[in-house]
Image (cartoon, rainbow, N blue to C red):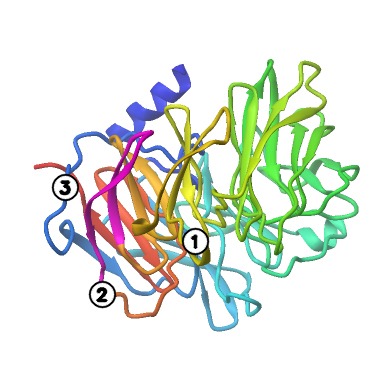
């Protein structure tokens, strides 16, 4: 709680969103004093940047710099912009992704003056944040005898102390820890009986142990951060190879969700910390890739478009569906100043008031995107600004109350 309070103060003082889903990976902005509603046509546009390359990455923000990634022709690049939307540097990180849903996937992770990014082919690289100069790179498939999945690597890597943690899913390393300064292997767990999905991990403290949590190809996986040993795994099969959403940890329990009737489930970690017992499973909340949000004992996320449930709310403790809001549609979400910011797959941006009883759209607008949907990037609210991206275009809006 103390660390969370410090992070909120930092966010309020200077734009600080150093990795996917923010400082604590809980997707909750520390911003306050934001607009309670938007004018017709949306809040004021501060600037736009139209050379992001093709990609689905969100943004990270640190030390007065915005980081994202995109594909340009045959290559993938990491980009850095200043807070006025001017390009500071652009550095290649391997090949572009030409497979299903072409484009860059992952958001750079900033830590101690370095940004880290895994491309869709499993090339993991580190760059000086100020200049873009390469520091080191590792081909994960080669080092850990891993094979890429159908949709490409999509994991947003995480830093814990001196270690970078990720899941290559290889025979010589399912989950691994690399020295963040050199890229050298600290440990590699080859015992996990599952391969990589597309989820971005979290590191949590459970009964005094730092635990790496992720959603693998067919299961929830928990690994001891210090030793690399598998603590437990629990089945969570996907119906169509789309285990994407980051896990939610709360009060000794872990909730996950997958699209296309893959559904959501919650498992409670047993007292020994070496196993977990399923508490509930349901298919109303079948979040594909737009993210889950835990608020006041309830989980919010998007149901898949073909089932027309829109935003779905379920009780965290029981999995009981409280409401569905089909008018919101399939969406990617973030939370700021008491409200959800919902970026729809159709390109519509919505400000949504949610309670455990209902969701109410307060304001919405659709920017003039030059490229057709679907819009899959996660929105970010940081430093009084709303950042939304679709493929080549990044739009930044002023959402501060005047």
State left or right for residue 119 relative to residue 167: left
- Nearer to us of marks 3 and 2 is 3
- Nearer to us of marks 1 and 2 is 2
**Where is the C terminus found, in terms of image quarters?**
top left
How many numbered discs, if any?
A: 3
Mark toward the start of the polypeptide (3 vs 2): 3
Mark 1 sits on what residue?
A: 57
Q: Is residue 61 visible?
A: no
Q: Position of residue 280 (x, y in %)?
A: 66, 35
Q: Quadrant of residue 397?
A: bottom left
Which circle marks residue 37 in the picture? 3
Closer-to-camera residue (136/376): 376
Which residue is depicted at the point 84% across and 57% down? 143
Looking at the image, residue 265 lies above or below residue 72: above
Q: Position of residue 318 (x, y in %)?
A: 58, 30
Between the C-alphas of marks 3 and 2, the distance is 20 Å
Mark toward the start of the polypeptide (3 vs 1): 3
Marks 1 and 2 close (CB-CB < 8 Å): no
Between the C-alphas of marks 3 and 1, the distance is 27 Å
Marks 3 and 1 close (CB-CB < 8 Å): no
State left or right for residue 144 relative to residue 49: right
């Amino acid at each position: 709680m103390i660390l969370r309070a410090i992070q909120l103060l930092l966010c309020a003082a200077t734009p600080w969103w150093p990795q996917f889903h923010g400082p604590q990976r809980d997707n909750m902005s520390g911003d306050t004093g934001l607009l309670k509603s938007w004018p017709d046509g949306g809040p004021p546009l501060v600037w736009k940047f139209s050379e992001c390359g093709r990609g689905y990455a969100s943004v990270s923000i640190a030390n007065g710099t915005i980081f994202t990634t995109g594909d340009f022709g045959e290559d993938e690049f990491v980009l850095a912009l200043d807070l006025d939307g001017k390009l500071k540097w652009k550095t290649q990180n391997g090949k572009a992704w030409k497979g299903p849903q072409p484009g860059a996937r992952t958001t750079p992770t900033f830590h101690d003056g370095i940004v880290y990014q895994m491309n869709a082919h499993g090339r993991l690289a580190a760059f000086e944040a100020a200049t873009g100069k390469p520091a080191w790179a590792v081909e994960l498939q080669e080092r850990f005898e891993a094979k890429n999945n159908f949709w490409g690597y999509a994991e947003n890597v995480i830093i814990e102390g001196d270690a970078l943690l990720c899941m290559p899913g290889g025979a010589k390393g399912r989950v691994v820890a690399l020295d963040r300064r050199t890229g050298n292997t600290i440990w590699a767990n080859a015992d996990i009986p599952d391969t990589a999905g597309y989820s971005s991990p979290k590191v949590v403290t459970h009964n005094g142990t730092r635990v790496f949590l992720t959603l693998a190809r067919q299961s929830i996986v928990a690994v001891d951060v210090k030793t690399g040993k598998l603590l437990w795994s629990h089945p969570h099969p996907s119906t169509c190879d789309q285990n994407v959403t980051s896990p939610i940890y709360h009060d000794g329990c872990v909730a996950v969700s997958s699209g296309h009737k893959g559904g959501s489930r919650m498992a409670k970690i047993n007292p020994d910390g070496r196993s977990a017992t399923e508490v509930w499973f349901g298919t109303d909340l079948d979040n594909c890739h737009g993210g889950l949000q835990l608020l006041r004992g309830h989980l919010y996320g998007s149901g898949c478009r073909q089932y027309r449930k829109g935003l779905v709310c379920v009780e965290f403790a029981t999995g009981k569906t409280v409401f569905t809001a089909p008018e919101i549609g399939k969406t990617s979400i973030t939370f700021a100043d008491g409200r959800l910011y919902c970026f729809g797959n159709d390109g519509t941006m919505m400000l949504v008031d949610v309670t455990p009883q209902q969701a109410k759209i307060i304001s919405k607008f659709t920017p003039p995107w030059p490229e057709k949907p679907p819009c899959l990037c996660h929105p970010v609210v940081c430093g009084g600004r709303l950042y939304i991206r679709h493929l080549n275009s990044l739009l930044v809006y002023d959402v501060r109350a005047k």
